């Protein structure tokens, strides 16, 4: 921008990140308050009708809806508000708002403080991170998992999902694969476990799906008669790595295989490519991976490269049966990597 441009022109350009920051938060609120679903179902509604249906303050609601109207996400005709096409088009991306705004907003607000030596870890809303991640998984991790499962002869009849979040992963698999007789989910967040049980009940899967509120390590040390033939570790190892280091990951994988020596492991992780000039100028690199990378080292998580993980697998005597990536129609960066593993020689 030329310095001869007016201050106002420079100001407008300079505060666009502020506009996008406030907008992302309020799109999240549009979803989370149920206002999006109400307007989607009912069409045009007056302020008074919306306030009555949602038990909201009319004056505050008027400003909130007016804000989103001015940003092009709502339409107002004769005093009635409805969803604009712009809002309808972002509905499928709702889980990204759940994870980044609902889950990591508090993390980002603590970054300046947590840059200081000895300042400890930033907080995050684990339930919202899990819920958002589960929603995103419908597009990337779940199809990737199914692709890896197809590499194994026979059928998956007993599935264990470590870090199952709100249970969406388990529900999707049980509905898609009727041969799954038992599916267990292990999740450390009590709130996510409650949501998982509610989702399982809504889908009538109580007889096939069982939720355990525990950490992955605690589950492995607890007595259980359940013997899975597949274990899914979606974005779990980088949590263990951040909290317990490489030795903790090796101990966890070793314990897993000792406990279930004949299983196949499906591991999905994100490649650490923060310093790749090419990938980080990719549209999804900037829109998704750049903020994703930012949150992890502040919340006791450690992302690593495929070569690192493959070295850990070798140390744990695990054989890589297959290695796959997300569908390039969804994510062409190749930064989400899936592995199918088994104990060497099994």
Image (cartoon, grey):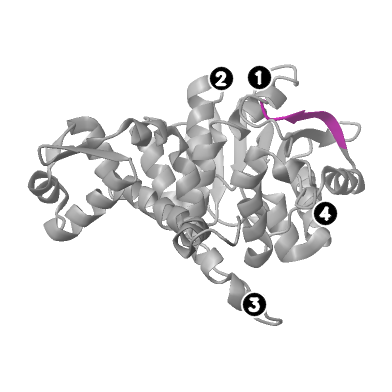
Q: For the N terminus, give its image quadrant.
A: bottom right
Camera-near label (2 vs 3) is 3
For marks 1 and 3, give the CA distance.
45 Å
Judging from the image, what secondary structure is the residue with disc 1 in? loop
| Residue behind mark 2 | 179
Q: To which residue does mark 3 refer?
A: 120
**Residue, disc 4:** 250
Q: Which of 134 and 184 is in front in this view?
A: 134
CB under 8 Å between callouts 1 and 3?
A: no
Quote the CA–CA distance across marks 4 and 2: 32 Å
**Foreground disc of the pair 4, 2:** 4
Span colored in magenta: 319-327
Does residue 272 appear in this view? yes
Q: With respect to residue 274, does 120 lie above or below?
A: below
Please give the residue where the numbered disc 1 appears in the rendered image: 155
User: As drawn, is 223 to the left or to the right of 86?
Assistant: right
Which is more N-terminal, label 1 or label 2? 1
Q: Residue at (65%, 58%) from the top-left corner?
A: 294
- Label 2 close to label 1 by CB (< 8 Å): yes
The residue at 71%/58% (across/down) is: 240
In this rendered view, identify the residue nearer to me: 178 or 339. 339
Task: Point out the frontmost of discs 3 and 4.
Answer: 3
Proximity of marks 4 and 2: CB atoms separated by less than 8 Å = no
Residue 89: x percent and y percent? 40, 31
Q: Is 196 in front, or is 37?
A: 37
Do callouts 4 and 1 mark residues in contact (Cβ within 8 Å)? Answer: no
* Disc 3 element: loop
Q: Tag 1 or tag 4, which sits nearer the N-term? A: 1
Label drawn at residue 103? none
Q: In which quarter of the image is the C terminus?
A: top right
């Amino acid at each position: 921008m030329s310095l001869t441009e007016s201050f106002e022109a420079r100001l407008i350009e300079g505060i666009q990140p502020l506009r996008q920051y406030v907008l992302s938060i309020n799109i999240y609120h549009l979803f989370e308050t149920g206002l999006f679903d109400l307007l989607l179902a009912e069409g045009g509604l007056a302020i008074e009708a919306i306030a009555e249906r949602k038990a909201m303050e009319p004056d505050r609601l008027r400003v909130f809806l007016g804000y989103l109207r001015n940003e092009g996400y709502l339409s107002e005709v004769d005093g009635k508000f409805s969803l604009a096409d712009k809002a309808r088009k972002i509905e499928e991306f709702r889980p990204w708002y759940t994870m980044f705004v609902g889950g990591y907003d508090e993390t980002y607000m603590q970054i300046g403080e947590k840059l200081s030596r000895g300042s400890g870890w930033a907080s995050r809303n684990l339930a919202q991170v899990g819920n958002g991640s589960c929603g995103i998984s419908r597009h990337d991790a779940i199809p990737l998992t199914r692709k890896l499962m197809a590499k194994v002869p026979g059928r998956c009849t007993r599935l264990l999902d470590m870090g199952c979040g709100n249970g969406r992963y388990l529900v999707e698999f049980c509905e898609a694969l009727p041969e799954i007789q038992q599916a267990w989910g292990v999740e450390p967040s009590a709130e996510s476990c409650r949501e998982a049980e509610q989702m399982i009940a809504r889908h009538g899967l109580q007889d096939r799906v069982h939720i355990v509120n525990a950490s992955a390590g605690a589950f492995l040390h607890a007595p259980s008669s359940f013997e899975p033939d597949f274990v899914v570790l979606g974005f779990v190892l980088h949590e263990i790595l951040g909290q317990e280091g490489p030795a903790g990951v090796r101990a966890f994988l070793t314990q897993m295989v000792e406990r279930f020596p004949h299983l196949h492991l499906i591991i999905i992780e994100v490649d650490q490519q923060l310093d790749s000039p090419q990938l980080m100028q990719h549209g999804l690199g900037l829109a998704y991976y750049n903020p994703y990378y930012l949150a992890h080292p502040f919340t006791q998580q450690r992302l690593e490269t495929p070569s690192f993980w493959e070295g850990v697998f070798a140390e744990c005597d695990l054989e890589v049966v297959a290695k796959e990536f997300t569908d390039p129609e969804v994510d062409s960066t190749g930064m989400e990597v899936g592995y199918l593993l088994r104990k060497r020689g099994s």
